[in-house]
Amino acid sequence: MSWAVEEWKEGLSPKVLQKIHELESQVDKLKKERQQRQFQLESLEAALQKQKQKVENEKNEAATLKRENQSLMELCDSLEKAKQKISHDLQVKESQVNIQSGQLNSSKKDIERLEQELKR
């Protein structure tokens, strides 16, 4: 079949045949270059998709971390409030213990005084 493709060139001058050969070589070269660029384009598109996926994953992870951080901050606030309440309750109880201790000492003194009176 290649003879049919070449048949149209019969009878052309050597100069024209040379030019046709140069043009065919240039076409082949351009086809190869186009294939290489197409391959580069596909590779770059694949890399771009990979980077887009990576960015999306990072965004999702950042959102998850943000939610987790918010949750931890709320937990810290809750624990701080609980700590303050417990601290206040402890102060109240210490105050009550001090009052009762004072009452106990007063009662002991009253008992000692009464024992002294009984001994007399």
Image: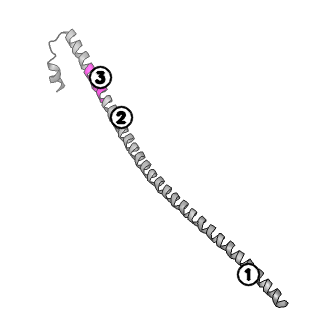
Q: How is the image coloured?
A: one colour
Question: Could you classify mark 3 by the number of other residues whose Cα lies within 10 Å: few (under 14), some (14-19), or many (20 or more)?
Answer: few
- Residue identified by numbered label 1: 107
Q: Quadrant of residue 83?
A: bottom right
Q: In the rendering, which numbered label is found on residue 120?
A: none
- Residue identified by numbered label 3: 29
Q: In the rendering, which numbered label is found on residue 44?
A: 2
Question: Could you classify mark 2 by the number of other residues whose Cα lies within 10 Å: few (under 14), some (14-19), or many (20 or more)?
Answer: few
Tell whether label 1 touches label 2 (CB within 8 Å).
Answer: no
Q: CA distance from mark 2 to mark 1?
A: 92 Å
Q: Position of residue 114 (x, y in %)?
A: 78, 86
Q: Is residue 73 left or right of residue 98?
A: left
Q: Is residue 7 left or right of residue 94?
A: left
| Callout 2 amino acid | Leu
Q: Quadrant of the C terminus?
A: bottom right
Main SS, magenta residues = helix
